[in-house]
Image (cartoon, helix red, strand yellow):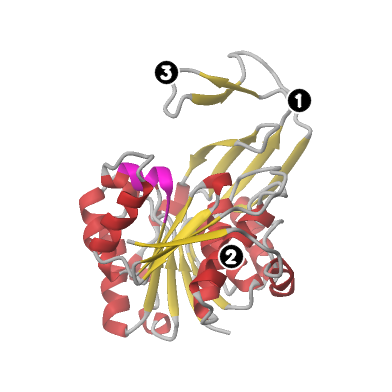
Amino acid sequence: MQKVVVIGAAVMDVLLKSNGLKVVKGHEVPGGVAMCEMIGGKLEAEESLVTSGGGGTNVAVALHRLGEAVKMISRIGSDDLGEVMIKQLEREGVDLSMLQKGEGRTGVSVVLVSPDGGRSIVTYRGESGLIDSREIDWEEMKKADWIQISSLGGEMEFLEDIVTFALTSGLKIGVNPGKKELEQKGRLLKLLPKFDLFNINRMEASLLLGVDYEDEKEMVKKMVDMGAKILSITDGKRGASVVVNRRWLKMEAFSVKSVDDTGAGDAFVSGVVSGILQYRNPEDFLKMGLANGGSQVTKLGAKDGLLYKDEMDKWMMKKLKMTEEWV
């Protein structure tokens, strides 16, 4: 068991899955595909769920289920939603001694899920986007073996401070950046050689590096040349890859029926981090990430499908196709 401090968002997720949500194509929509309902329309939902969400809580719960000792740094409001979140996370066994509480509202995400498992999310960050570095017990942080960071709402100075602290304290650090960190390309890429793990999806990598989406090898090569130590890239239903010492392993995804894609990325990176902390080889920790992500999408919400340690062992017995090359 390793000691992990997870830093990131904590919001309450309100999920509604409706067969009436339409997936349509349109040139006015980034990515060319949208999920919609007409203005003024009303839909019935076949499933609903209200649960803790946000990258911080998702990764904290996932790592604890896989056997790690986890403390979580995030921020909630002094409201009823915050109390609900605390109760849910305590039931999962996550150590909340470093959780911050502000005077404002707890963040909320409304997640609309289409019949094929695709989702659209509207997020109000609330207190979740206001983590205060002055309230962090930095001496307690030094006891960790690994710091795992998810979205910080674009607070790059905070991210830089955490990286500096990790380096001076001899701690390992993994980063799964959010949209607002990715928008600050120069500052993020400057930090890349200092991360022990950098996780990103293929579309994010394309935009971050200015490389054509189809040229995945060029994306990988660029980040390795910039000094990436362990690099993991997810590619949706096509699978994922990791790069360690310029050895690029690509593995297909597990064949599962997707119910809801919410939290798949958090589940994946948690599997990878747990595998690294267990001193697994790259083939294994890549497979652990894919197993956790594959299991997660079979359930509604970002946590119900997360694997426990004994369940992970069963998934690891399954065979997946893998290719290998050098970059």
162 to the left or right of 281: left
Span shown in magenta: 200-207
Tag 3 or tag 2, which sits nearer the N-term?
A: 3
From the image, state whether disc 2 or disc 3 is nearer to you. 2
Q: Which residue is mark 3?
A: 28
Q: Which residue is mark 1?
A: 44
In the image, what residue type sits under mark 3?
A: Glu
From the image, state whether disc 3 or disc 1 is nearer to you. 3
Residue 54 in view in this figure = no
111 to the left or right of 168: right
User: Residue at the spot x=53%, y=50% of the render?
Assistant: 106
From the image, state whether disc 2 or disc 1 is nearer to you. 2
Tag 1 or tag 3, which sits nearer the N-term?
A: 3
Q: Quadrant of residue 18?
A: top right
The residues tagged by marks 2 and 3 sit, at their Cα atoms, a distance apart of: 37 Å
7 to the left or right of 327: right
Tag 1 or tag 2, which sits nearer the N-term?
A: 1
